[in-house]
Image (spheres, grey):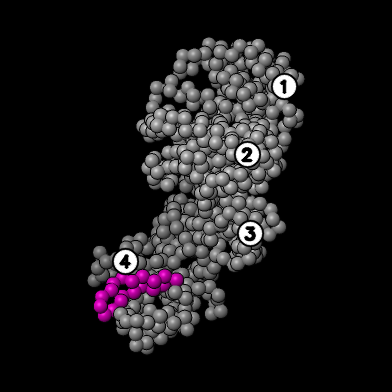
Amino acid sequence: MIRQYELVERVKAYDPSADEELLNRAYVFSMKAHGSQTRASGDPYFLHPLEVAGILTQLKLDAGTIATALLHDTVEDTVATLEDIEKHFGKEIARLVDGVTKLSRLELHSEQAKQAENFRKLVLAMSEDIRVLLVKLADRLHNMRTLFHLKNPDKRKRIARETIEIYAPLAERIGMHQVKDELEDLSFAELNPDARDSILAQLSRLRTEGENRVQRIIQELRGTLAEEGLPNAGVTGREKTAYSIWRKLQRKNVSFEQLSDIMAFRIMVDTVPECYQALGVIHAHYPVVPGRFKDYISTPKPNGYRSLHTGVIGPERNRIEVQIRTSDMHEICELGVAAHWAYKQGEPRTQQGREYRWLRELLDILEHAQKPEEFLEHTKLELFQDQVFCFTPKGDLIALPRGATPVDFAYAVHSEVGDHCVGAKINGRMLPLRTQLQNGDQVDIITSKAQTPVPGWERFVVTGKARARIRKFLRTQQRTQYIELGRAILQRQFKSEGYEFSEKALEGVIKIFQQPSADDLLASVGSGLHSGREVFHAVFPGHKPHVATPKEGDDKNAITVPKPKPKVKGHNAPLPIRGLIPGMAVHYARCCHPLPGDRIVGIVTTGKGVTIHTIDCETLESFHESPERWIDVAWDIGPDSPEEHVGRISLVVNNEPGSLGTLSTVIGKNGGNITNLKITSRNTDFFELLIDIDVKDAKHLTNIMAALRATPAINAVERARGR
């Protein structure tokens, strides 16, 4: 256990002006507050905050952060309150302690929801002061070091998984590589001990077989650098961690023996020019491994990391990785953002630098995510992926996850730019929005005020910010459509029963349907969760519907299918269908592909709103016993509407050269655009095909089919039904 005077001496060793009295008070307060509490190991609980403080002294953090570490569990696990902390230590320490508190008293439905909610609150707290994250990481590091004391294996695995999925990536994001490596290794030991032991055994075997290979490589590199005018360059070598090796094995799907860059060597020089001089020396003396050079000095990582990386076939024909940096760069590499918070920096820096951009993006995701679990999902996307560096037309650097597209880039520039993105020029060429960006790409986003997020974007964006923003827009738009549809359904229901619909009538029944407002009840009707009949009978519980008396000779068991009603004015008029987005409140059935000009009917489908079918669709037979789900609809799209619809046709085409070319030419000449083509059968004489074509209406599709029938290469054409 670290003694009180020892802790103070550690801090004063790097900060002689540290507030000694603050540290003493925090030490005593925490020790008294935790009293006789013990941990799973049986040790006094006070040992935990003391060890957390000790970890932070190794990072040379200010006295306020050390005091926070000593106090960080007092509010959660003892009778002490935030008011007590503020009274004894001031507002700043109280704010930091409040930010670090894990809030485990939160009553949520699942461990995942609890984890997600805690992480949301951590992000909010660390956005105000990044020292909250530094204390939290030290707290998690000590908990992982003592994880083996927990008896419950499921709990150990859950904590280890949370650590490797959230806290290790966070440590990497703020550049604390030492902490990141240890968190990953401790988690790896819990989650996959066999794999870790296997890798460690093979590393030990390599060390035995190679004897002094590392030292020989270091000596040769030093000699080479000294001969070329860099006698003071320091060279060190280290093995990559077991987890990083395992992850590379998984990613590349290779065996341990096939990995040739398990060893990394670091060259330390005094200045930036010497970094490039050392790089030139290494490249001049050893063959370079293509694609392994990275310049993080001219283009630093978002967390401030700067270094030169290269891969070469080095001494003794060993393939090695070489990192070249100055001592200042090395300090930031090892300590990350903690290096900026050391006592020597004076007042803590606020998160205005580029290394804090990711934190602002997490806050933006937090704003647009609907549920804690959704935030956690988007955040994992944001933290996990490797990065590419792209530039705006003005030369500003934008760092994105690998696999990012121009839509991700647009949202990274600004949310409004993303919302109104219609196209992108990449290195001066107009390319599709789903194009994956590469390192060094210059991206020029083209916008239009008329543009809004498109559902299809969600399938290819990779950043959490873009996905959260798109989902929020679609939810808002979908809710508006559901409300309008629900209102129209209830108007029809009330009218058919001889009543005038009024939204005031819904106020008295919203509790019955467990909805917070009348709009929410309308949306639930529009989405198909509740029927118009249910709501009507809740409003008028004593109402008895008129039942028609069957005439003599009628079949009492016959099922009457409601016939589509003619267009009339007023509330019974067919619902308009215009400007639809597939998958939203109203969408077109894929079983019959309805087109303007077809007679159509709407079916209320749970969770999807209304599905539009052609009146002769075979699927409608399954809804004969649910007449309340049928809605009379009609097309309300003008002849000059620019909207296109998908029509599906089946064809039998002669199996001869040029048939498919003739087919596509005929469709194109008649104004159609093939969006999908599938060969369903093939023999020596014929192809059978299913083709989806963008057309304006049913008449347009009929014209195309007529033109195809007149083509010698086409044996048969008909409109397709079914998927």
The residue that label 1 is drawn on is 15
Which residue occupies 36% across, 73% down? 690
**Placement of 575 over or under 96, stated as above or below:** below
In front: mark 4 or mark 3?
3
- Depth check, mark 1 against mark 2: the one in front is 2
User: What is the number of the mark on residue 442?
Assistant: 3
| Image vertical order of residue 544 relative to residue 33, above or below | below
Mark 2, other Cα within 10 Å: few <14 / some 14–19 / many ≥20: few
**Of 327 and 564, which appears nearest the observer?**
327
Label 2 vs label 3, nearer the camera: 2
In primary-sequence order, the first of circles 2 and 3 is 2
Image location of residue 10, percent across then percent down? 65, 17
Chain-order first, disc 4 or disc 3: 3
Towards the viewer: 636 or 429: 429
Q: Earlier in the sequence, mark 4 or mark 1?
A: 1
Q: Is residue 453 visible?
A: yes
Say which amino acid is labelled 2: Glu
Q: Identify the residue under disc 4.
A: 621
Q: Which residue is mark 2?
A: 227
- The reply to whether callout 1 and callout 2 are in contact (CB within 8 Å) is no
Q: Position of residue 382 (x, y in %)?
A: 55, 45
Q: Could you tell me how far apart the alpha carbons at marks 1 and 3 are, in whole angstroms?
A: 45 Å
The region drawn magenta spans 675-692
Q: Does the magenta segment cover residue 486?
A: no
Asked if residue 680 lies in the magenta stretch, the reply is yes
Above or below 68: residue 380: below
For the residue marked with disc 4, what is the amino acid? Glu
Q: Earlier in the sequence, mark 1 or mark 3?
A: 1
| Element class at badge 2 | helix
